[in-house]
Image (cartoon, helix red, strand yellow):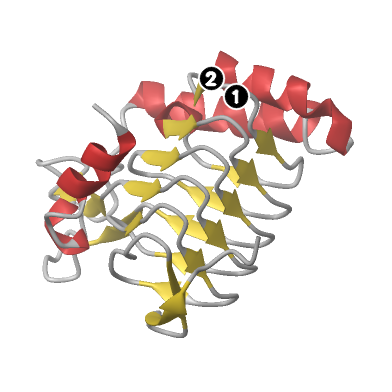
Amino acid sequence: MTDTKQTTATTARRPRDRYRLKRADQSDAYRSPWSRREQLGIKAFGLIWLLACRWTPGPANFWRLAILRLFGCRIEGRPYVAATARIRVPWQLEMHDRACIGDEVEIYNLGECILRARCTVAQQGYLCGGSHDLSMRALPLIIAPIDVGKDAFLGARAFVMPGVTIGEGAVVGAASVVVKDVVPWTVVVGNPANPVGIRKFKD
């Protein structure tokens, strides 16, 4: 399936429609929705990233990618991940060629997260793949995928909500909060983010 077909299929629903319970039987707010294996994997990755990656210089990107692959991250080509980035669940992350995760970016990917070719998440951006169902006493964890399209650019401190698809070539302004899908090649800004123009190249 091509990226265009994937985007069309994904944007057929609203972001909220893509939410699902992480654990259908979570009846207690203090009961973890994560399996013991998942909990151990998340903790082990966090510790290894702190000790083996967080202090590394920019050119050591190959080493950081190797650690991510070790923990199940799906990588195509040569994406870039800053040493100060924070990735919650590496096996739920997919990165394509030249995709970029900038300094102090938080990939809180409780659901699947796809960063397609040449997209950029600038410094201190936050991709939030989960929340809680506040209509239930148990506050069960709800998760949804995030898909950032080819050549998209997310400005510094941009915040993306669960279930959102950022279309190919789209631009999200700095400190914007994205609560719904962004049409390809559209520029959005604000809280909540709204379209202000179309991205065009001068050359």
Q: Residue 41: image x %, image y %?
A: 49, 24
- Tell whether label 1 touches label 2 (CB within 8 Å): yes
Position of residue 106 relative to residue 89, above or below, is: below
User: Which residue does the numbered mark 2 point to in the structure image?
Assistant: 71
From this viewpoint, is residue 56 visible? no
Residue 44 position in % (x across, y down) = 58, 25
At horizontal 29% and vertical 64% (from top left) the residue drawn is: 181
Q: Is residue 130 visible?
A: yes
Q: Secondary structure at mark 1?
A: helix
Above or below residue 155? Residue 140 is above
- Please identify the quadrant where the N terminus is shown: top left
Q: Residues within 10 Å of mark 1 (few under 14, many from 20)?
A: many
Q: CA distance from mark 2 to mark 1?
A: 5 Å
Rendered image: mark on residue 104: none
Q: Which residue is mark 1?
A: 68
Say above or below: 21 vs 157: above
